Amino acid sequence: ASCGIGAAISRQLAAAGAKVAMAARRENLLKEIQDEISKEGGVALAVRCDVKNRAGVKELIQYTERTLGPVDILVNNAGYWAFRCMKNLHEEEWDEQVDVNVKGLLNCIGAVISGMCERKSGHIVNMSSDCVKQPFVGLAVYAGSKYFLEGMSRTLRQEVCKDGVRVTCVQPGDVDTPGAVKTLMTLEDEQCKALYSYPHPALEPEVIAQAVLYAVAQPDHVAVNEILVEPRECPL
Ligand SMILES: NC(=O)C1=CN([C@@H]2O[C@H](COP(=O)(O)OP(=O)(O)OC[C@H]3O[C@@H](n4cnc5c(N)ncnc54)[C@H](OP(=O)(O)O)[C@@H]3O)[C@@H](O)[C@H]2O)C=CC1
Ligand SMILES: N[C@@H](C=O)C(=O)O
């Protein structure tokens, strides 16, 4: 939650009255967001955590529950991507996408799901992508990781709906974030350059945060299972 969509979600959830625990590797950025939230009268914790570290994620959740109480909402937002064609064999980036987007997701869900089922209440929000609706050149491995997220979410939803737990997938189109800027500035494959090296409409991170807020603010019996949000000028 140190920048981009995660930071916007933290700010909006805190403004809506949630006590927010924010996790990322760059603790200094988290502290700045924590200060902003506190100045606005909200409650936020900033905890350094790498979602790839399962034990670290469990410690994050234990610390959060000791400090703020049980986790009612888990937002799995941490994600990594780069526009690279598979033939160029950026295998370390493939690993990073699997480690963060797939294994990191599982680490976070694994740290909260039993507690939510025991308490008969909880909401898991998973940050997916519009790439699960349409292929984008350069995002093959990333799309695979988000297809995992979607398939896991659909099945988990079946398993936990009777335990009072909801699972929402948010599918953003292009959003103007530090991660998006970085990946668009480091295009190296000619096919990707031809497709993506031009200004194109992108959403503000706050728009995606509003979608999250909408999903988690519904009455208990209402499940917003999927939300696809795109710039108007870029329909699929
Ligand atoms: N921007 C876009 O166009 C779209 C984004 N998405 C998805 O939205 C999510 C957020 O993306 P966006 O805000 O754009 O990305 P950014 O790169 O701007 O931000 C990513 C956030 O994830 C955190 N993060 C990354 N790796 C880890 C890790 N190993 N452990 C803990 N935190 C981590 C980063 O914190 P830190 O580096 O400090 O650890 C940072 O706060 C991602 O899942 C992405 O796939 C989906 C569709 C479109
Ligand atoms: N919208 C995708 C990129 O183009 C993404 O998920 O990042």
Image: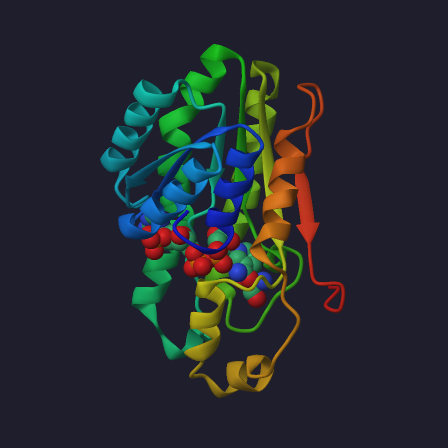
Viewer can see residue 143: no
Q: Residue at x 55, y 64 (%)?
A: 176
Asked if residue 85 is positioned above or below residue 112 in the image, the reply reads below
Q: Describe residue 36's horizontal placement relative to residue 153 as left or right.
A: left
Q: Is residue 48 above or below residue 234?
A: above
Q: Where residue 206 sits in the image (x, y, percent)?
A: 59, 51
Q: Is residue 87 above or below residue 209?
A: below
- Write down which quadrant ligand 1 falls in: bottom left
Q: Can residue 44 be seen in this view?
A: yes
Q: Position of residue 212 (x, y in %)?
A: 60, 40
In percent of the image, x 36 and y 44: which residue is there? 104
Residue at 43% in and 39% down: 39
Horizontal placement of 78 versus 235: left or right?
left
Q: How many marks?
A: 0
- Residue 115 percent across, percent down from the top left: 42, 17
Task: State how the image is colored.
Answer: rainbow
Which of the 4 quarters of the picture holds residue 209? Answer: top right
Q: Quadrant of residue 81?
A: bottom left
Along the line of sight, which residue is nearer the eye, 159 or 80? 80
Q: Residue at x 23, y 34 (%)?
A: 55
Depth order, front residue of 202/46: 46
Q: Which image quadrant: the C terminus?
A: bottom right
Answer above or below: position of 119 versus 155. Answer: above
In-image side of 28 versus 212 (left or right): left
| Image location (x, y in percent) of residue 184 | 48, 75
